[in-house]
Amino acid sequence: MSTNEVMARLEAAASALGDVDVSAWSDESLKERLGQLSAALVTLDSTLARVADGVRARGLRIEEPVSI
C-alpha cells in the first residue's frame, strides 16, 4: 500500500471517529455496546501508541497542528 493510500485511510478513520458521539446514545445502547466499544478503544489505543512510538524511534516529534 502506498504512503498516499495509508494517509487517506488514516484520515478517513479519524473522520469516522470524529462522528462518534456516545453522549447521543441511550444508556441502553451504550450498555449493550460497551464491551465492543471497549475492545475497539483498546485496539485503537495500542495501535496509535505503536505508530507514535515508531515515529519517535526515528527521532521525530509528534506535534499538534497549528490552527490558522
Image (cartoon, rainbow, N blue to C red):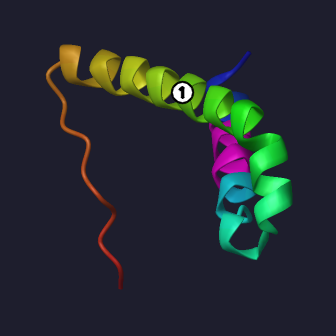
Q: Nearer the viewer, residue 24 or 63?
A: 24
Relative to 47, is 34 above or below?
Answer: below
Task: Answer with the quarter of the image where residue 37 lies.
Answer: top right
Would you name the residue on which mark 1 appears? Answer: 42
Whether 40 is drawn above or below 64: the answer is above
The image position of residue 52, as x and y in percent, is 34, 27
Q: Tell me where residue 36 sits by quadrant.
A: top right
What secondary structure predominates along the stretch shown in magenta?
helix
Q: Classify the position of the C terminus by image quarter.
A: bottom left
Residue at screen point 69% across, 64% down: 22
Where does the image place residue 33, in percent across and percent down from the top left? 80, 42
Residue bounds of the magenta highlight = 7-14
Q: As rendered, which of 34 and 56 lies closer to the eye?
A: 34
> Compared to 45, does 26 lie above or below?
below
User: Disc 1 on helix, strand or loop?
Assistant: helix
Decide: few, some or many residues near mark 1? Use Cα within 10 Å; few <14, some 14-19, many ≥20. few
